[in-house]
Amino acid sequence: MIKKCLFPAAGYGTRFLPATKAMPKEMLPIANKPLIQYGVEEAIEAGCDTMAIVTGRGKRAIEDHFDISYELEHQINGTNKEQSLAGIRTIMQTCRFSYTRQLEMKGLGHAIHTAQTLIGNEPFCVILADDLCVNAPGMGVLRQMVDLYAKYQCCIVAIEEVALAEVHQYGVICGQEIANGVYQVSDMVEKPKSEEAPSNLAVIGRYILTPDIFEVLKNTPPGKNNEIQITDALLQQAQSKLVLAYKFQGKRYDCGNMHGFVQATNDFYHLYAQSH
Ligand code: UTP
C-alpha cells in the first residue's frame, strides 16, 4: 500500500566523530552490515519497493553500497564468498533507489522537504537509519506502522517511553490513548527540558507521513537549534487533522550514540555467535 520509504541521511553525525568525518554515519556497521541496510530490509518487509535517500556531501558510500561493484563481483565469482553478498544482491533486485542532495543541513524537517521531488503525491515511510529497530521476523516496527496506517490513513510517529532525564534528546508527544498503544497526538515538543516535557513518550526514527506534510514543511520556520523540525510540522498537522503516535513492539537501539551502538553490536554478535 505504501511503496516509498525515505531515508534522511544528510546529517553530520557529529556524535560519532572522527569516524564520521569522511564516512556517513549510516554506513557504520553493526556486526557486518551497515545501519542503512538494516533500515532498507525493514522497509522491504513493510511492503516498500522504492527507497528515496537524502544524502549530502561525503555520503557517496551509500550510493555505492546499493550499486553493483563489478570488480568485486569478478573477484569472488564462483567462490564461497559470494554467499556474503546474497543479502545485498536480493535487495538490489527487489527495490529501486533514488537520491537527492540536501545542500545545507537545516534539520530533519528540511531534509524531508528536500525529498518532495522523490516522493511526489503519495503517503510514505521515513526511517532514520541510526535508530536500529528489531522485532520478530515479519513483524518489524515499520510493518506494524503500515498496518496501522491501513486503518487510520494519517500521519503516524513511533514512540517509546524514555527516562525523564533523557527527554531533552527527543521530540516528545502528549495525547490521548485511543486504542492499545495508539495515541491521538494533541501536543508535541522538540527536545524539551525534563520539567517542561508533556510526557515521557519520545518519538523515535520511524514515521509514516501523508504528502500534505510537504506544504506544511514549506511554511515551517526554523525551531529548536535553528533547524526546521518535523516535530513542529506534525504539531501543526495535529491541530487540524488526526496524527497518531504508536508505541511499537520491539527493541530500538540508538546507534547514533556510542552506548546504543556498542549495545547493538554486542547483541547482534551474540546472535551471530549462537548460530555459528
Ligand atoms: P540527528 O539529530 O541524529 O543528527 O539527525 P546527525 O547530524 O545525524 O547526528 P549528530 O547529532 O550530529 O551526531 C536525525 C536524522 O536526520 C538526518 C540525519 O542524517 C539523521 O538520520 N538529518 C538531520 C538530515 O538528513 N539533514 C539534516 O539537516 C539534519
Image: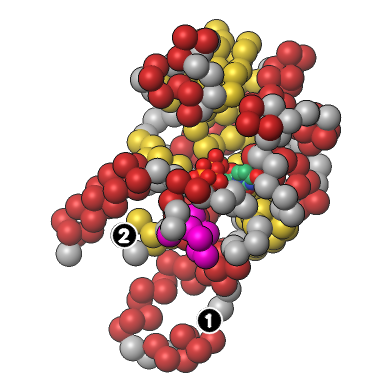
**Residue that mark 2 sits on:** 31
Ligand 1 located in image quadrant = top right
Q: How many marks?
A: 2
Q: Principal SS element in the magenta part?
A: loop
Q: Which residues are magenta?
A: 19-25
Mark 1 residue crowding within 10 angstroms, few (<14) / some (14–19) / many (20+): few
Q: Is mark 1 within 8 Å of ligand 1?
A: no
Q: Which residue is mark 1?
A: 69
- Residue type, mark 1 in image: Ser
Q: In whole angstroms, how far apart are the C-alphas of marks 1 and 2?
A: 21 Å
Percent from the top left, x then y, of residue 257?
A: 40, 43
Residue 136's disc number: none
Q: Position of residue 251 (x, y in %)?
A: 35, 36
Q: Going 44% across and 29% down the picture, which residue do you hit?
A: 248
Whether the residues at callouts 1 and 2 have beta carbons within 8 Å, the answer is no
Q: Secondary structure at mark 2?
A: loop
Q: Position of residue 233 (x, y in %)?
A: 72, 26
Question: Which is nearer the N-term, disc 1 or disc 2?
Answer: 2
Q: Is 230 included in the stretch rendered in magenta?
A: no
Question: In the rendered structure, does residue 21 fall within the stretch colored magenta?
Answer: yes
Residue at 62% x, 13% y is 187
Taking the spot 68% from the left edge, 35% from the top edge, the residue there is: 227
User: Residue 256 is drawn in which quadrant?
Assistant: top left
Quadrant location of residue 33? Answer: bottom left
